[in-house]
Amino acid sequence: MPDVVRVLVVDDSAYVRKVVTQMLGRSPFIEVIGTARDGQEALERAEDLDPDVITCDLNMPVMDGVAFVRSQMARKPVPILIISIAAGSGEQVLAALDAGAVDFVQKPTALATERLMEMSEELVDKVKAAARAPRRIVVARAPDTVAYIRSGPNAFDIVVIGVSTGGPQGLKRLIPELPADLPVPVAIVMHMPVGYTEMYAQKLNELTPLRVVEAEEAQVVKAGTVYLAPAGRQLSFVREGTEVKTHLDVRPLDTPHRPSVDVLFQSAAEVFGERVLGVVMTGMGSDGRAGAAWIKARGGYILTEAEETCVVYGMPRSVVEAGLSDGAIPLDALASTIVGKL
């Protein structure tokens, strides 16, 4: 990350441009070097100013946020952070992420602009994280690499995955590469706001031979199905006789994220014992480190995404530095590595 992150703020509202500039200005490590009112003006300003990060609204005249992301990525890749309205923008947010945006932050509503200051800390953290994202990762596929393979058939009964910043793009690369006859279920925690996980699961389901669903209460966990934890609920497992079922709860309440990777991983370790393959992918923070320790303590196995393909090397780094990773695998080799271990 540069010593001072140079940011271009793009929004059609003069008030929002002012407030976002004020929020970012609270950090001594961020400097707002310019603003733009729409996507077309943003393209011109980005060419002149060469910012480290761009924050961008979605609903703008002349050129909207999605079109801007596509155009900017075609010209010169820059980490772009979408600032979206909470309601009614899910399709656009996912489209912007598909186009190459690194992450997004939610505005409370279009009208309650006085509440924009509530997102100040999150915005600053995500701008700094976006500045660390390698520009080639935004648009380029990671290089092919030889996967690290562990021998032994039927070693695991479940794959659990934790991911955050860069997750929507990363999972769209990983999950479609898993085969239709995958012999185990997959459960995923991804940090997303309420209202996005169901839509994302539906989009992902269209891209893969596996069945992808937003997890519901008391679903029987079956091979070949991917269960995405719903935003705002913790995903865990309960064993009933020969079956394992999903369980959703707002508790525990003291985790930094809900759903929490740590909660999912710990539950998997308690229910499946040594037959858990955990995967920690790109993301901010350290969610997954404590859960990885639970899996390792029960005899399970942990893979982490390699630094060179992470948008943000936070969550995997925390696992690696704790001595809990059994292998760091680039994104393009992750699916084949997982399959080779089952």
Image (spheres, rainbow, N blue to C red):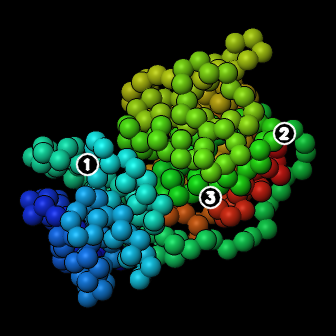
Query: Image height check: is 186 above or below 206?
Result: above
Residue that appears at 60% across and 43% down: 205
Residue 320 is at least partly visible in this image: no
Amino acid on which disc 3 is placed: Arg
Contact? badges 1 and 3 (CB < 8 Å): no
- Residue 85: which numbered mark, if any? 1
C-alpha gap between disc 1 and disc 3: 27 Å
Q: Quadrant of residue 87?
A: top left
Rendered location of residue 298, percent (x, y): 72, 33
Rendered location of residue 23, percent (x, y): 17, 59
Instruction: Give the residue at mark 3.
Output: 173
Q: Residues within 10 Å of mark 1 (few under 14, many from 20)?
A: some
Circle 3 SS class = helix
Residue that appears at 33% across and 76% down: 52
- Which residue is farthest right? 152
Query: Image height check: is 284 above or below 182?
Result: below
Residue that appears at 29% across and 79% down: 43
First along the sequence among labels 2 and 3: 2
- Please state if 61 lies on the left or on the right of 217 as rendered: left
First along the sequence among labels 2 and 1: 1
Q: Nearer the viewer, residue 105 or 41?
A: 41
Instruction: Give the residue at mark 2.
Output: 155
- Residue 49: which numbered mark, if any? none
